[in-house]
Amino acid sequence: MNTFRVMIVEDEPLVAFDLKMQLEKTGLSITHVFESGEEILEVLKSEVPDLILMDVQLQGSLDGIDTAHEINRKYDIPILFLTANTDKATFDRAKLTFPHGFLSKPFRIKDVLHAIDLTLELEKSATENTSSEKYLADRVFIRTNDYLEKVMYSDILFIEADGAYAKIVTEVKTFILSQTLKKIQSKIPAPYLMKVHRSFAINTEKVDKISDSFVLIGNHKIPVSRTYRDALFKIFNIF
């Protein structure tokens, strides 16, 4: 686990300091400790960690849940929430950000490490499953108003997650479905689609340009997270 970089967002200085010290003793790299959501959002513009530990009840204009929503819109970073006496309404709000887990305060460092280990294993498993599944079906029918419209898998450019919804983007039309990206991708897996980010799956046949952090499909710039980068690069002939 010592190759993974972690950021902590916690507005209680003593809790943040103790958590940082305990995790660093295990070999984890704690790159930053922030007191607010605004601070981490600013740093993420230039530096992206492998994992974020974040208090749900941050002070300021953005609590931990609001911050998680903002992070999910732009990045593919697993988030573990730190919680203390969270009521059901807050917990239900937090679930909508699809966190990788909740750690109740006061927490034991052993429980934190187990949660981090599980998160990293789940991310690794998601990458392997995404690149190995194969289906023979070549089309899907999408309900639009009063009829079903055929969409060939080969015509799909990419799929973008948007909370509980997802957008299927083709060259001529965009469809909005009340399904998660995970559910859609289970029906339209590789080789037609490959997940490259927590919020994006792409048709690799449509990729025009590649960089370390994004791909271009026509005029669309799709982010690529480090979790999926190696698996993506393996399918292209790169000289």
Image (cartoon, rainbow, N blue to C red):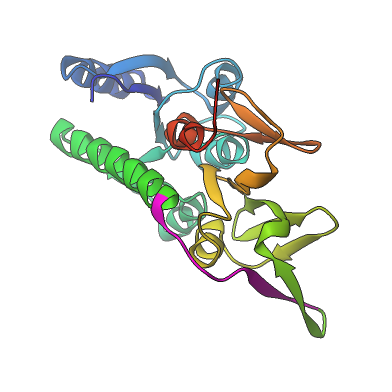
Counting from the top left corner in percent of width and height, residue 141 is at 69, 76
Q: Position of residue 59 (x, y in %)?
A: 51, 31
Q: Is residue 94 shown above or below 228?
A: below
Tell which residue pokes out farthest to the right in this image.
172
Indicate the position of residue 57 as horizontal and vertical percent values.
45, 38
* Residue 7 located within the stretch drawn in magenta: no
Left or right of 26, for residue 152: right
Residue 130 x, y percent position in the rendering: 44, 51
Q: Is residue 107 visible?
A: no
Is 135 one of the magenta-colored residues?
yes
Residue 24 occupies which quadrant of the picture?
Answer: top left
Looking at the picture, does residue 197 appear above or below residue 181? Answer: above
Q: Residue at x 44, y 23 (%)?
A: 49
Q: How many marks?
A: 0
The span picked out in magenta is: 132-144
Q: Quadrant of the C terminus?
A: top right
Q: Residue at x 42, y 38 (%)?
A: 78
- Asked which quadrant contains residue 170, the reply is bottom right
Residue furthest to the bottom: 146
Task: Answer with left or right where residue 179 lies relative to residue 2.
Answer: right
Q: State the residue in front, 88 or 229.
A: 229
Q: Is residue 2 left or right of residue 79?
A: left
Residue beneath the point at 68% across and 66% down: 177
